[in-house]
Each structure stands twice: as structure tokens, then as C-alpha cells.
Amino acid sequence: MVALAGGTLLTAGLLVVAGSASPAAAAPGSGPTAVVALGDSAISGEGAGAYEPDTNGPGGDFCHRSTRALIQQTAIPGIQNKISLACSGAASSDVRINGTTHYTEPSQADRLRTVARDNDVKMIVLQIGAFAGYVSFGWIADRIGRRPAFTLFMVAATGLVPLFAFYARTPALLLSIGILVGFFMHGYFSIFGAMLSELFPTRIRASAQGFCYNSGRLLSAAAPYGIGAFAQRYGFASVIATAALFFAVGGGLIWLLPETKGAEL
């Protein structure tokens, strides 16, 4: 729930000073200064609503780029344009140079060429922390166990989300805390492929995994509405910080399941 709702604002960010910033060989643009976002739903603003019209279904484009996404809400001195090329559900192949098309949109890196031609790109926002969390969670879980690894990530996320919501008010804090938020708040997703596979016998494994994962997604569908409604009354930072307590709840509930480290499929 928190991962889907909090991901609308809390993203693993790395601001890379880009100078020329574009993957293209052409000289950087001489137009207005710009910051560009690349990535998937966490940085596109999935779940936040207020999507750019051409990314909310027309022609099959469901990239769901929100005007409430982090890149649009963060003030960066000297930046005139905030441009998001991020797309909900994008894979690494949809971001790289000469990559694949996703929801009718060409590779984000390829589109960045055009942006860099028309703008003086100063920064590019990438989801470095989340990627590192995804690829390292399995390594950690293989060494200390599925349940301890999941609890570790949940407890860290419980503490980091309020810290990010209340105190990340400068570019330096957005970078340093944001990377850690991305690492712990997204990295735990890697448990689903491993632990859910180990929990169920072969004959029902695929169905059981799909049921468990999508039941959680169904319940979390109410989170964007609930957070938005409560945020109008209590403030966004306070609501997000309170919602982060669900991470702690999840870190405890997983101990009701058996440890599956080393289980034979």
C-alpha cells in the first residue's frame, strides 16, 4: 500500500550534473535550462492523479505522467523547464539508448536527444537507489534469510520515509535521503519472486503468486484517494509519514510465514 502510494512522491533520485547531459553526440541545446526525469512509475507519478492528458489513455499511452510527480513539485534554482520522460511500468530496456517502445512511446534515452537539442539540460533524474535495492535484496536474503531481510528493509523504510517527507528540503538532502528511500522502499519487491515461489507447491505456484500479489494491489488501490483526502486536511508530509507505519506492520507480519531460505522447489 505505502509503496504504491508513497511512490507517487518518494523516488530514488540521483541528480547527475549533465553539462552536455544528452546521450547524443550533438552539442547541448542553447535553449532554456531544464531538468529531465527518466524511469518508471515511481518517478512518473503513478497513483498521484492529475496526469498529462496524452499519457492517460489516448492511443494506448498509459505512461501516467503526473503534474504532482516529484520532479514537478521540487524547486531547483536556475531551472526553467521540468521535463518528465518517465513512464509507468517502464523496464530498463525502455530507458536505454536504442531501447524498446513502451505504451507507444519510444525509448526514453532516444527521446532525451530531442530534449537536449531544444533545451540546455542541466540535470537528469535517475532511479539509482531503487535499482540498487532490487539487485541487492536477493543477495541479502540468501545470506540472512527471507524474513530478516524483508524486516530489515521494512524497518529502514519506516524511518526513512518520515525523514524524507519532513526534512528533505534541499537538493543535497533530496539526493542523499532519496537514494536510501529508493533502496529500501523499492528493493523489497524482489522478495515476491523468490519467497512466494518457495511458499507454494508447483501445481498451484503461479496461481497462488498471482492471487497474493494482486490481492495486495487491489487493497492498495484505495491508498492514493485516501492519502489525497487526508493530505488536504492534515498535510501531505504528515499523512505520508503516518502511512509509513504500514512498512513496520509488514515487517512484523512476515514472521507469521515460514522461513523459506534454501527450500527445494
Image (spheres, rainbow, N blue to C red):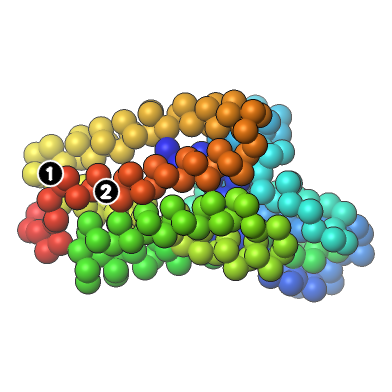
Considering depth in this image, is 82 or 25 the residue closer to the camera? 82
| Whether residue 145 is situated above or below residue 25 in the rendered picture | above
Q: Quadrant of residue 19?
A: bottom right
The answer to the question of whether label 2 and label 1 lie on touching residues, with beta carbons closer than 8 A, is: no
Q: Quick one: quadrant of the C terminus?
A: bottom left
Q: How would you rate the neighbour count of disc 2 (Cα within 10 Å): few for under 14, some for 14-19, many for 20 or more?
A: some
Location of mark 1 (residue): 200
**Label 2 vs 1, first from the N-terminus:** 1
Alpha-carbon span between mark 2 and mark 1: 21 Å
| Whether residue 101 is situated above or below residue 16 in the rendered picture | above
Amino acid on which the number 2 mark rests in the picture: Gly
Considering depth in this image, is 151 or 213 the residue closer to the camera? 151
Residue 238 is left or right of residue 18, and the answer is left
Q: Position of residue 135 (x, y in %)?
A: 38, 65
Q: Position of residue 220 (x, y in %)?
A: 42, 32
| Whether residue 167 is situated above or below residue 229 in the rendered picture | below
Q: Position of residue 58 (x, y in %)?
A: 65, 27
Element on which disc 1 rests: loop
Q: How would you rate the neighbour count of disc 1 (Cα within 10 Å): few for under 14, some for 14-19, many for 20 or more?
A: some
* Residue 72 visible, this angle: yes
Residue 154 is left or right of residue 109, and the answer is left
Q: Residue at x 79, y 53 (%)?
A: 75
Q: Position of residue 15 (x, y in %)?
A: 68, 66
Residue 242 is left or right of residue 189, and the answer is right
Location of mark 2 (residue): 252
Amino acid on which the number 1 mark rests in the picture: Phe
Element on which disc 2 rests: helix
Q: Residue at x 59, y 26 (%)?
A: 229
* Residue 130 visible, this angle: no
Q: Quick one: quadrant of the N terminus?
A: top left
